Image (tube, rainbow, N blue to C red):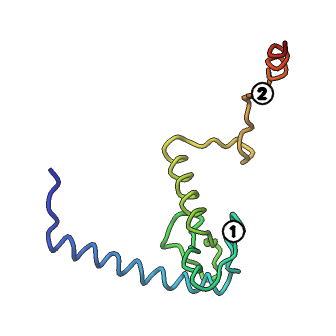
Amino acid sequence: MPSKKTQKDEDIIAEARRIRELREQGYREQAFKLYPWICARCGREFSGKKLRELTVHHKDHNHDNNPQNGSNWELLCLYCHDNEHQEYLDKESFGSAMTAGGKDSPATYKPFAALEDLMKRKKP
């Protein structure tokens, strides 16, 4: 059975969220001044109310590394940002699928290799 949160626990969580929001406001505003309001992955443009869907991603995954020149940031939409973090977690958990050259390893499975033979067999 889960334990009940105490007021002290709730206060600690609230304070941590407040500090995070303050920190984010600073680098988010800076990143929006430095970079065009476009997702660096999918290329979608943002403005107006939709701008809240554009997030600042820390390339090294360290939210405390916020150089003034923005070299550790890239703007990503919510969907690409979630995908980036999931890929990072997958690599942490299962190891990298990258080759020594830094590129993804090529696919070796060829699902349609025998398609021509299958098609020939189907004809009466």
Name the residue furthest front. Answer: 124
Q: In the image, what residue occupies the spot 79% across and 20% down?
A: 114
Q: Is residue 100 left or right of residue 64?
A: right
- Up the image or down, 108 lies above or below 32; here it is above
Graded by Cα atoms within 10 Å as few (under 14), some (14 to 19) or many (20 or more), the crowding at tag 1 reads some
Residue 112 tag number: 2
Where residue 101 sits, quadrant-wise, is top right
Amino acid type, mark 1? Ala
Q: Position of residue 61 (x, y in %)?
A: 53, 63
Residue nearest the observer in this picture, 70 or 3 = 3
Q: Residue at image x 40%, y 77%?
A: 20
Q: CA distance from mark 1 to mark 2?
A: 34 Å
Residue 102: horizontal and vertical position, in percent?
A: 72, 48
Which residue bears the numbered disc 1? 40
Helix or strand or loop: what does disc 1 sit on?
A: loop
Instruction: Compare residues 42 and 15 and report the one nearer the observer.
Output: 42
Instruction: Give the amino acid at mark 2.
Output: Phe
